[in-house]
Amino acid sequence: MTKYISIQEAMDKGKGKVSVRGWIHRERGSNKLKFITLRDSSNVIQCVFERVEFEKRWEEIDHLQVETSIMIQGEIKEDKRAPTGYEIHVDDFEVVGKSENYPIGKDLSVEFLADNRHLWLRSRKMIAILKIRSTVFAAIDEYFKGEGFYEYHSPIFQSVQCEGGSTLFQVPYFGKKGVFLGQTWQLYAEPAIFALEKIYTISPSFRAEKSKTSRHLTEYWHAEMEIAWADFDEIIDYGERLIKHVVKKVLEKHKEDLEILGRDIEKLKPSIKKPFVRMTYTEALKILEKKCDMKVKWGKDLRTIEEEKLTLLYDVPIIVTHYPKKVKAFYMTEDPENPDVVQGADFLAPEGYGEIVGGSHREHDLEKIKKRLIDDGEDPAEYEFYLDTRRYGSVPHGGFGMGVERLIAWICKLDTIKDAIPFPRTMERYKP
Ligand code: 4AD
Ligand code: MG
C-alpha cells in the first residue's frame, strides 16, 4: 500500500520519491506540460506532468480543474522558481473526486464569498486563519489549566440577562417565555466559585447586535474566567498574562501563516515583551482631548471611534479602568474611593481594534445589586439564585470575558471579525 505523506513532510524530505494527496489549487498548461499547484492542509507545492510520459492520459490531465482531489506519486526536488521552492515531477496519479467549474474564481466580492463560505474555507487566507484560531483556543486552555483553573460550563439556555436586555435573543421554550441564549456565562459561573474557586470556559455567547460593524457578531466564542478571593488588580493581571501567552504561542507556531495574511509580526512583539498600558477612564478622556483633539463628556461611554484613536497612540493593549457606574453593568463593584466609578476594565487592542476583554470585580453588597437591577428595569425576583451568592459566604471575587474572534482579528490584522470564524453570524447573515 502506498504511504502518503503531507506536502510539508515531502518538502522537508526534499528529494526522492514521494506520494502526496490533496486538491488542485491552481492549474496552467501548454501542449507539452501541465503545472498544478497541489494543496493540502500543510502547504502547497507545484507538480508538473510531462506529455511525453502520459501520452495516453493527456486528455484527462489537460482537463484537470481547480479543486479536483487527486493522489500523486512522483519525484520531488528543489526548484527555486516554484512558489514554495520545491517541485514534484509526476510519475503517476489518480483523480479521486472531480471538480468542474469551481464557482470561486475571479468574482471575489464580499457578498459572493459570504454566499460561498463553505467553499471559501479552502482559500489559503482562511486556512491560515483557521490554523491560528485552533492555536488560540489551545493556548487559552493551556494558560488557564497552567494557572490551576478548572474548566466549568454554564448553560446556554438562560433565564436572566447580564449585559443588557437589548441584545438578548429570546428563544421559544415549550410555550414558555423568558428563556434566552446566554450573553455570557457569568451569572451561572459566580455560583461555582464557591465550589471550585478558579474557573474558566470557552463557549459560544449570543448577542442580538443590530449594529453592522467590523467587530460585532451575533454568535461569538467567549473565553471567560471567574476567581474567588481576588482583588481588581489581580483579575486584570490574569487578563494581561493570558493575552501575552496567546500571542506568544501564535508567533511561535504561525510565522508562515501570518506571512500569508500579510501580517507584520513586529507589530505584535511589543505586546509580549512590554507591560500593557493602564489608565483610568478619566485619564483616557484627558488623553483623548490633549492628543486626539476629541472631547468626550465625563459619564459617556467611549465610542468605537474614540477607542480606535486611543489605541493608535500605543503599541500594546490599553487597559482602561474605573468607568462611570452608569455606563457599566449592574454587577461591578463601586470604587471604595469614588462611588461614581466602578472597578471594571476594558482591554483595548492596538492598531484600532478596540475592546477585546471586559471584566470587573463583582459587587458584594446585596442591596446595591438589587437597586441597580431595578434601575436597569429588571425584576430582582428573577435573580434570586444569583443573589444567593451574596447571602451565603460571599467572598471578594471577579472575572473577565474575552471575545476570541476579536483577539484573532487583531492578531491576524483582519479587516473584519467575520473572517475570524468559519461561518459568521450577523444581523444580516445566518446562511449557509
Ligand atoms: O464586555 P462584555 O459584554 O462582558 C461580559 O460579557 C462579562 N460578563 C464578561 C465577564 O466578566 N465574564 O463582553 C466581553 C467580551 C468583549 O470585550 C468583546 O471582546 C466580546 O466579549 N464581545 C463580542 N465579540 C464579538 N461580537 C460581539 N457582538 C461581542 N460582544 C462582546
Ligand atoms: Mg464590554
Image (cartoon, helix red, strand yellow):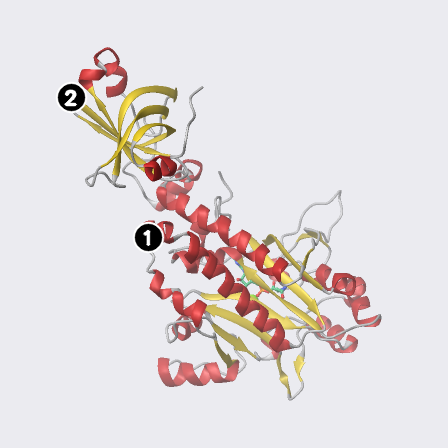
| Amino acid residing under circle 1 | Glu
30 and 334: which one is in front? 30
As helix, strand or loop, the secondary structure at mark 1 comes to helix
User: Where ligand 1 lies, by quadrant?
Assistant: bottom right
As helix, strand or loop, the secondary structure at mark 2 comes to loop
Q: Is mark 1 within 8 Å of ligand 1?
A: no
Residue 168 x, y percent position in the rendering: 63, 56
Mark 2, Cα crowd under 10 Å, few <14 / some 14-19 / many 20+, is: few
The residue lying furthest to the bottom in this view is: 337
Task: Tell me the quadrant of the picture where the N terminus can be found.
Answer: top left
Q: Is mark 2 within 8 Å of ligand 1?
A: no
Q: Which label number is shown at residue 119? A: none
Image vertical order of residue 275 relative to residue 402, above or below: below
Mark 1, Cα crowd under 10 Å, few <14 / some 14-19 / many 20+, is: few
Residue at (47, 57) in percent of width and height = 249
Which residue was labeled with disc 2?
Answer: 32
Q: Would residue 70 appear left or right of 130 to someone viewing this image?
A: left
Q: Would residue 70 appear left or right of 246 to someone viewing this image?
A: left
| Amino acid residing under circle 2 | Lys
Residue at (35, 39) in percent of width and height = 12
175 and 300: which one is in front? 300
Image quadrant in which you'd find residue 417:
bottom left
Residue 227 x, y percent position in the rendering: 69, 67
Residue 46 x, y percent position in the rendering: 27, 33
Image quadrant in which you'd find residue 27:
top left
The residue lying furthest to the top in this view is: 56
Which residue was labeled with disc 1?
Answer: 259
Between the C-alphas of marks 2 and 1, the distance is 34 Å
Image vertical order of residue 259 relative to residue 227, above or below: above
